[in-house]
Amino acid sequence: MADNYAASLKAYAQHPDAIIPVEKMRAALMLVCAQADQVWPSCPMAHQIDDRLRTKGRPAPILLEYKGSGHGAFGLPMPDNTDPRLTAGGGNAADTNAARADSWSKAVNFLKTNLAK
């Protein structure tokens, strides 16, 4: 599936109706992506969102990018690195679980900060 998304990203400029106007968002934004994601190109997509916001003069999102992590980079950390769900979407178990631990705590803090406003 990742190859289909990657091919679509190359042609997205030819389909402006498919572009989500993220610059219209008024809320703070946090993006989590994994460099070894085998389900979709999460980091190139996250960078496109970041670039679009910056180009349109909007605040940049918080972008958490994890090397070695697969599609499961976000979520509660697993009790150990042997859970097969950690590598089901690419990456290695240790990096994916480390990304989960890091991104989960940062997401909780992000929500506490931004929902309190």
Image (tube, helix red, strand yellow):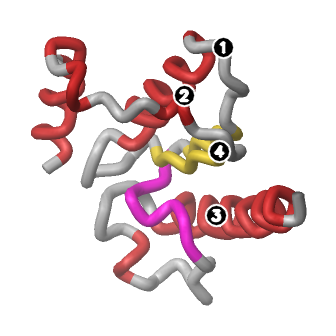
**Which of pointers 3 and 2 indicates the residue nearer the eye?**
2
Circles 2 and 1: CB distance less than 8 Å?
Answer: yes
Q: Are marks 1 and 4 in contact (CB under 8 Å)?
A: no
Please say if the residues under marks 3 and 1 sit with CB atoms less than 8 Å apart.
Answer: no
Which amino acid type is shown beneath numbered disc 2?
Answer: Glu
First along the sequence among labels 3 and 1: 1
How crowded pointer 1 is (Cα within 10 Å; few <14, some 14-19, many 20+) is rated as: few
Q: Over which residues does the magenta segment extend?
A: 68-75
Q: In front: 1, or 24? A: 24
Give the CA separation, mark 2 to mark 4.
Answer: 11 Å
3D distance between C-alphas at marks 3 and 1: 33 Å
What amino acid type is highlighted by mark number 4? Leu
Q: Name the residue under label 3.
A: 98
| Residue wearing tag 2 | 23
Q: Residue 5: percent from the left, percent from the top?
A: 19, 38
- Of the image marks 3 and 4, the number of the one nearer the N terminus: 4
**Which residue sits at x=54%, y=32%?**
24
Q: Of the residues shown, which amino acid type is indicated by label 1?
A: Gly
Query: Is 97 displayed left or right of 13 in the figure?
Result: right
The residue located at (44%, 25%) in the rendering is 48
Q: In this view, does 40 lie to the left or right of 33?
A: left
Q: Mark 1 points at which residue?
A: 57
Which image quadrant is residue 109 in?
A: bottom right
| Quadrant assignment for the C terminus | bottom right
Q: Which of marks 1 and 4 is nearer the N terminus?
A: 4
Q: Residue visible at 58% across and 46% down?
A: 31
Amino acid under disc 3:
Ala
The answer to whether residue 88 is above or below residue 80 is above
Nearer the viewer's eye, disc 2 or disc 4?
A: 2
- Mark 1, secondary structure of its residue: loop
